[in-house]
Every structure is written in C-alpha cells, then in structure tokens.
Image: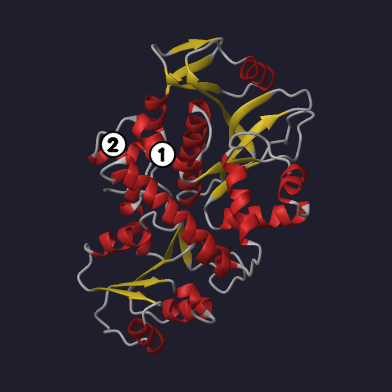
Amino acid sequence: MKRIQKEIIKRDLKKKIVFIVGPRQVGKTWLAKKIATDYHEPLYLNFDSLKDREIIHGENWLPTIDLLILDEIHKMKNWKNYLKGIFDNRPQNLHILVTGSARLDAFRQSGDSLAGRYYIHHLFPLSYKEAMIDKKFTLDYLIARGGFPEPLLAENSEEADRWRRLYTDSLIREDILDFENIHELGKMRLLLELLRKRVASPISYSSLAHDLETAPNTVKKYIQILEMLYIIFRITPFSRNIARSLKKEPKIYFFDTGMVDGDAGVKFENYLALSLLKHCHHRTDNSGSKMRLNYLRTKEKREVDFCLTENEKPTLLIEAKNVEISLNKDIYYFNKKYRIPAEQIVRYLNKERIKDSIKIRKAESFFRELAI
C-alpha cells in the first residue's frame, strides 16, 4: 500500500539523515525498502543481524552505495556519534535513512550530537486518506480493523484478532522489558486492560493506582512507557488563554483502534483522535510550525473533544459524534466566547450544513481534507 510520506522523505534524504519512527509493525522497514527501489545501489543493514553488524562496525560498504538504510541502529553503543561520523564524512552521493523501534525516538531526544543533521518523520497506522489510495475500505471497516497493515489486510476478523493478541503479548513481554526493567508485568497488563475501557475519558492516576494496588507515580511511569512505545497517546487540556482551564487529567487513546473496548461512539472518537494526531505530526515534521492536539475542559465541566493548536494558538475546535444529533452546546460556547473556528464531525450524517457558524460535517469528507 502507498504511504503519502514516501516522496517527502525522498526529498529530505537529499539534505540530511532521515529518521522514521513510530509503532512496531506499522510499516517502517517496508517503507524504507520501498524508497530503496528508487535508488541505484541501496544497502539495507539491520543491527540485529550478526553479519550486518560486522559491516556496520567496520563501515564496510562500497563507495558506490547511494542509500544506506540502518535498522535498529539504536542498539549500538554510541550510535549517535557513529551516525554523526558517517554523515559528516559521507561521499556526496550517499543518503542515510534510519528506522527502528520507539526506543529510537526516545534516545534521539537525549543529547544533541546529531543536532542540525537530521529530519524526523513519524509513521503511524494507515489513515483513511492513505487506505483509500489502493483499497476502497469503508470507514466502519477501518475503525474495526485499525490502520496497522497486517490486521487491515487480513482475510477475516479472526486473523486480525489473532495478530492483535500476538502483537500485544510481544509488546508486553519483549518491548517493555527491553525499554525498562519492569518486574510487575501482570500489573502492566492490567493497566492496559483498564485503559482500553477508559478511552476518551479524562483519567485519574489515583483511581488507576487504587485499582492496580500501587502508587500513582508508578501508574504515571507505566503510562509514560506505554506512550513512548507508541501503544497509547495522551491528549492534555489546552489552557493558554482559556479561562479556568484545568491543567491535568489527560485523555488516553490507542494507536491501534482495534484495541479500544467501548461503544461505537468511543471507537469513532479514538479513530478521529489518531487521524488528528497524525495530521499534527505530519504538519510539524514538514514545516516550521508546531501543531499539537489538545482538548478543552473547564472547571464548570464544559468540554470539547479536540482543539488543534499551531504555535500555541488554538486554530480549530472539533467535536466527535457517532450519529447525527443537535449541535453540541459546549463547542458553541467556546466558539462564540473565544472566536475559535469549530467543526462537529459526524460518523453517520445525512447532510452537511453550517449552524451558528459551526460546520457539521461527514467524517469521510473531513478525513479526506487532512494533510495525511
């Protein structure tokens, strides 16, 4: 399947090292090898392979190589200095593409030895816009299967569910242990199950700690690990210039919408959240502006599902609705009080319209207009 980022990554490879980061099994290596087909002499090396590791350590590749793909290089000691040396001394024809697990993204953020030498691209599950390029999936199908390539293309729902079980087990048994020495994997599993049932609702660390019979700080630590491994993502309330806004209680969503344990409305909201997050990362990765995804909530319990911000300024309010109902009163309140453009996105809608300057839109048409 085609990925919209391919041509943009090829453009950036002409200038700097390119990192592709994102969840496991989302297609990072596939995309890297797809990009390699447009080069004359590409070379793919995986640090997990002993044979490839020898080549990496010795830098034993031909000078005619024009694309060097390094997979799992973050497992190499002093890998950032290694990449810095290769980049600074590379022949002019050599482009460098680096892929790997979520751990790569976490390590990349520490230290500055690669400062000014790389671009980063976040590769997330396939969006509605991408899935429509080759396949004509329905939105319902995409929400049920999620955007990871294997379950999305599986022959039936049983195969998709089988992949999901194995994927989750692998993340808990291998990736979490690789990321940090966690002894209570049972509690990590239980936390994951609890979060699956609390998607789209502000979470309380104290409440989760009570259910897990552990400390709130331990819960925060576990959630941070799940987030760094691209299993979940947090959306925090936007507070700047919004009176009496709360600066706590994030909402949790899953990168794999198939993991959500909730009703149709919750699953749609998770899918919309992921689509907006992907849009924000894509815009941030490819422009000088910084886009973020937040939500709005005041002490009076007025709440809007999503708030897109650009350079710390709110640019669009979004309310998710599974079926066509009346205009949400809170999005109306924030739109009028703060003059922020607003749209209500509906999964099942008969006719798009504008009411009180707020657009009420079909989900499919909204997804087609996102950056990715």
Q: In this image, 355 relative to 165: left or right?
A: right
Mark closer to the observer (1, 2)? 2
Which residue is rendered at x = 42% and y = 50% of the image? 164
Q: Nearer the viewer, residue 88 or 163?
A: 163
Q: Position of residue 270 (x, y in %)?
A: 51, 36
Which residue is rendered at x = 26% and y = 59% of the image? 34
Q: Is residue 82 above or below residue 252?
A: below
The answer to which image quadrant residue 185 occupies is: bottom right
Q: Is residue 93 visible?
A: no
Q: Is residue 48 above or below residue 150?
A: below
Label of residue 132 in the image: 2
Q: Position of residue 192 (x, y in %)?
A: 59, 49
Amino acid type of the residue tagged 2 in the rendering: Met
Q: Nearer the viewer, residue 294 or 228?
A: 228
Q: Position of residue 172 (x, y in %)?
A: 53, 60
Secondary element type, mark 1? loop
Q: In this image, 60 relative to 251: left or right?
A: left
Which residue is rendered at x = 31% and y = 59% of the image? 30
Q: Is residue 327 above or below residue 99?
A: above
User: Disc 1 designates what residue?
Assistant: 371
The answer to which image quadrant residue 70 occupies is: bottom left
